[in-house]
Amino acid sequence: MQELLQYFFSGITNGAIYAIIALGFSMLYNATGLINFAQGEFVMLGALGLITFWRGLELPLPVAFVATVAGVSLVGLVLERLAIRSVRKPHPIVLIIITVGASILLRGVGMLQWGKDAHSAPSFSRLSSFELAGATLLPQTLWILGSLLLIVLGLQFFYKKTLTGKAMQACAISKRAASLLGIPSERMVLLAFALSSAMGGVGGILIAPITMSSYDMGTMLGLKGFCAAMLGGLGSSWGSIVGGLLLGILEAFGVGFVSSSLRDAIAFILLLLILYVRPTGILGAKAVQRF
Amino acid sequence: MNGLEADTRVLQPLLKVEAVSKSFGGIQALYNVSFEVAAGHIYAVIGPNGAGKTTLFNVITGIYTPEEGGVFYEQQPIRGRSVHQLVRRGIARTFQNVELFDSMTVLENVLVGQHVRTRCGFWGAICRWPWVKREEQHAQQKAVELLKFVGLEDVGGHRSADLPFGWQRFLEIARALAAEPHLLLLDEPASGLNAVETEQLAALLQQIRARGVTLLLVEHDMSLTMGISDKILVLNQGKKLAEGTPREIQADDAVIDAYLGRE
Amino acid sequence: MRGLENRNSHMKYALFSLSIVLTGWWVSNPYYLQLLTFIGIYTVLALGLNMLMGYAGQISLGHAAFYGIGAYTTAIATVHWNWPPWLGLLLALGLTAVIAFLIALPMLKLTGYYLGMGTLGFGMIFYILFREWTGFTGGTSGLVGIPPLSIGALTLDTGSGYFYLVWGIVVVCFVICERIVNSRVGRALRAIHDSERAAAAMGVDTSRLKVWVFVLSAVFASLAGFLYAHLVTFISPDSFDFIVSIRIVTMVVIGGMASIWGSLLGASVLTFLPDWLHVFSDYEMVVYGLILMVVMIFLPQGFTRGMLDIYERARSRYSRPSTSPQG
């Protein structure tokens, strides 16, 4: 029982991170219909950026947090402006290769900047871990869950209450109709890129204290985030959260009961299954465009 | 050969659309539409935008499945057949916005059209058996003939994307003919053509009919359809408004009210 | 017309083979000979992916998996079971074909982004399998002692012997691909690439054809893996990871989509680049990333193909068709 709870804690910790990455995928997909293969690299930049700002430059944590998120979303903006917008033929295959290229480029830059070694960050608060029904709960878990909650509330507010958020949803439904109404769809795409990369960055910041961060962590996390988004139904915010937590918990139990070497395979097997069996995700009722 | 003779010669219709209804999320695109196309005819479907012409087209080619009713081709239901199976059975089509294979030459486009009438697969291609060579040679000959038929034999080596738009339409028709269809569906073949090209098209369609191919066209251009069709179906808001010979349609009060306008 | 084309193509291959023989005879430095051998292996890889990506327009971000399946199958067969290598080859190709077929059946219903993610995930699963299935694959420390190839009494362990073998296979692969591309199936593949809707309307069974080209492409990768394993006689999972999949994609992008000879160029560039730039290993990813992005933004048909297109368009502007249809 105690063991189960322990797995559960570790599962929701990672799961919440996957959920945040998945939210980034979903948001961009909603606004632009694009899937950014470089999303995982934003997570890597977030984690290593935080370590540099907080540990390296010894900025206070909130400042380091803001600086990192700003930096990562700047990278997202530059990617959209320089690469995505200049594409002449926006075929999926071309956009895939471009974002894969961006992902490899960022990974390479990450390696040049931070080296091949893994880095670590201390927990956000100095509290020691506490016991709950015999299982250890890390304070970082609370930070992560709290952040997820804040992001969800923020997104709800953005989509439901602000004009920009509503405009972005209008763009997602029909770019042409939106532009006829005077909504600048180019700016919306730019904003969606900035926000989704910022979300990747936040995911990276939160994961930094509980894992070793290195230049090549992004691909795996990006794929898991995508898997979570697909599980819940791509484009749905609630789906991303459910999918992320579910993936995290399944992974934790898989590691606990089967083998730790299976850990990374679980996400991919799940991804392939979901792509084959139910591409709309477990929550999604919306038909997934298969092209 | 005129329409009357064809009617007496063939008893069963080539295509029979029976009480077809299709809706998209509450919008009734087609409602209880029935008609028959006799073999050897040129049959036109006209109607204003949003009348359900394209939906009808996609129902007949097997892209959409109707909620009610059925489509029968050569007395067999098309329900459950995939698009490529229908081509094999003799239904070919063109697209409203011309969809050629842009990276290929004009000649290659027509060669792809013969896909269902040739059979060389991966192994055949790799081993290049004598029969494969013969088949390829024959296909090339036939492609050249078809290009000659539509008047494009001089540009066979050009990329299809480089052709002027009007020629692309003719090429698309040649490509569809390459599949040796019994029934050729044309989706607004005259749209985007100038007056001279439209006349050429009318002549071409009659030549195609003379080859024994039945034509079903969805069209906007009145002069084209009135001039060459044996029968016309008028759709309005998903419903059948009238059906008859061009002369009957021109005299039909409901059609005049809804579409042609009174002078 | 047709006969002339055939004669041209015979000439092309005669010249190509001659230059291979001359190169093998002229280059005596074993290091360069091995480098050239690697180019041959990569050419086979790029050629296979180009059939899938360039001609049929379907992406695979996990092609290193098939490369790995080829290498590991023959390695396991020869090292663990003491099979003769050529039997290992048959097993590798057969196994790859079966696996690729089973994967392609559901996978190629997916298109675009989903296919990209699906193949990426699939590549990862096999990488994990190579790394974790220690009993068979040797785990991270890899498999050693893969025997060299031999034909009859002739052992192909000297640089030039293997060089000729690999490049002989390259020529055969070129012929196979060229024949497919210029045939009924090849045209159907290109048709799918240009417009899947129109291809289906012409009676092309698009999903079936995509499955077969995926299998073909996987078998090419497996063949390359076989050649690689018996050349270096040692394999480890890192030779088949995500970056390798990206490297293959980059070769195709440089060589040009739907360009058979471009595969040779792509493979050569990505083999020589690390050799010329000694700092390359640090900048490898940055360079790949930039190549992929820049080429795709400006020349979405790939580098060589894009250049050729520009040239052809410039030329045809002067010889625009001037007769009239129906005239």
Image: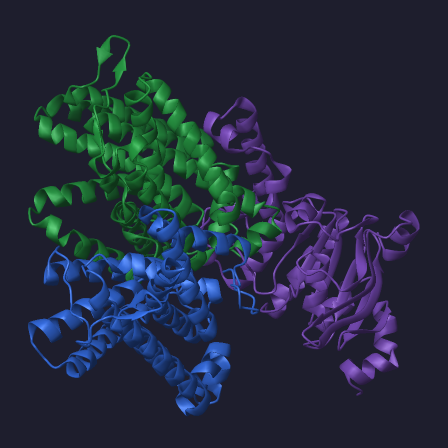
Chain colours: A blue, B purple, C green
Horizontal arrangement in the rendering, residue A165 relative to residue A99 (left or right): right
Horizontal arrangement in the rendering, residue B263 relative to residue C34 (left or right): right
- Residue A91 percent location from the top left of the image: 41, 61
In what quadrant of the picture does the N terminus of chain A appear?
A: bottom left
In the image shown, does A75 or A240 lie closer to the viewer? A240
Which residue is painted at 81% across and 48% down in the image? B74
In the image shown, does A248 or B30 lie closer to the viewer? A248
Is there any visible trace of residue A190 in the rendered image? no
Where residue B15 sits, quadrant-wise, is bottom right
Which residue is painted at 11% across and 49% down in the image? C280
Q: Which residue lies most toward the top here? A: C153
In the image shown, does B57 or A147 lie closer to the viewer? A147
Horizontal arrangement in the rendering, residue C238 relative to residue C53 (left or right): left
Is there any visible trace of residue B141 in the rendered image? yes
Which residue is painted at 23% across and 42% down in the image? C238
- Residue A2 percent location from the top left of the image: 37, 61
Q: Total marks drawn?
A: 0
In the image shown, does A192 or C262 lie closer to the viewer? A192
- Residue A232 percent location from the top left of the image: 48, 66
Where residue C30 sits, quadrant-wise, is top left
- Residue B227 percent location from the top left of the image: 77, 66
